[in-house]
Amino acid sequence: ASAEIAEQAVTVGPNESDVVTVTKSAAGGGQLSLNFDVSKMSESITITAVNDIKEAAIQSGAISGEVLSAFDVAAQNQQGDFSVVYSAEVGSGIDAAKILAWHSNDSGATWTRLEDAEISYDGLFASMVVEGFSAYAFSVVPEPSTYAAIAGVIALALAAWRRRK
């Protein structure tokens, strides 16, 4: 079962009435999906309630590259042995090797690159397994040719400006 989180918390767990997948659509487009592995949960284990999912705030320069997606997840997790697959819509036509994963424990004030994150990309969504709930983001580093093109345009503009003087 799955549920779109809106105004109230969503309960995740092994019971038939609980959900396994929680989704949230972003205001500006894009979507986040949390897929829980509840196979190891039992009724004796306290279940998880996903309280809120919102777009994470990112200060300029806090993340290298172009930010593709950033969400802050607030949840209650008393105990349990399960994993969560964090899948965010990042767009199509991206070189999967260029996607970077980021984490923030302080609601986006500081970001740390997840060097060892195993990121999969299906042509629209980037996914990784996360432990705990907080803010996560995906970014992409531009190709070196993009930097070269930008430098070339700046050089041409500077030359034209100097010539007019």
Image (cartoon, grey):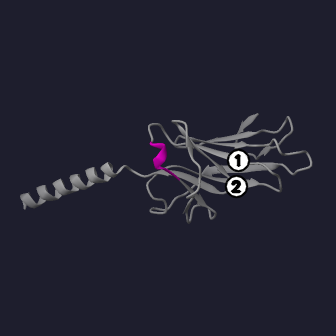
Q: Which of marks 1 and 2 is nearer the N terminus?
A: 1
Q: Which amino acid does label 2 sit on?
A: Glu
Residue occupying the point 80% across, 44% down? 11
Side (left or right) of 165 relative to 132: left
Tags 1 and 2 touching, CB below 8 Å: yes
Residue situated in front as seen by the camera: 3 or 148:
148
Kindly report the distance in space between the C-alpha atoms of the residues bearing marks 1 and 2: 7 Å
Residue occupying the point 69% across, 55% down? 133
Q: Which residues lie in the magenta part?
A: 95-100
Residue 140, label in figure? none
Q: Position of residue 36 (x, y in %)?
A: 74, 43
Residue situated in front as seen by the camera: 87 or 54:
87
Residue occupying the point 22% across, 52% down? 153
User: Where is mark 1, residue-wise?
Assistant: 84
Measured along the vertical axis of the image, is residue 126 above or below residue 102? above
Which secondary structure, mark 2? loop
Measured along the vertical axis of the image, is residue 145 above or below residue 89? below
Density class for disc 1 (Cα within 10 Å; few <14, some 14-19, many ≥20) is: some
| Quadrant of image for the C terminus | bottom left
Quadrant hosting residue 94: top left
Which secondary structure, mark 1? strand
User: Where is mark 2, residue-wise?
Assistant: 131
Q: Position of residue 72 (x, y in %)?
A: 63, 54
| Quadrant of image for the N terminus | top right
Residue occupying the point 66% across, 57% down? 134
Residue situated in front as seen by the camera: 16 or 93:
93
99 magenta-colored: yes
Density class for disc 2 (Cα within 10 Å; few <14, some 14-19, many ≥20) is: few
Measured along the vertical axis of the image, is residue 49 above or below residue 110? above
Q: What residue type is labelled 1?
A: Val
Q: Where is residue 65 in the image (x, y as percent from the top left)?
A: 43, 55
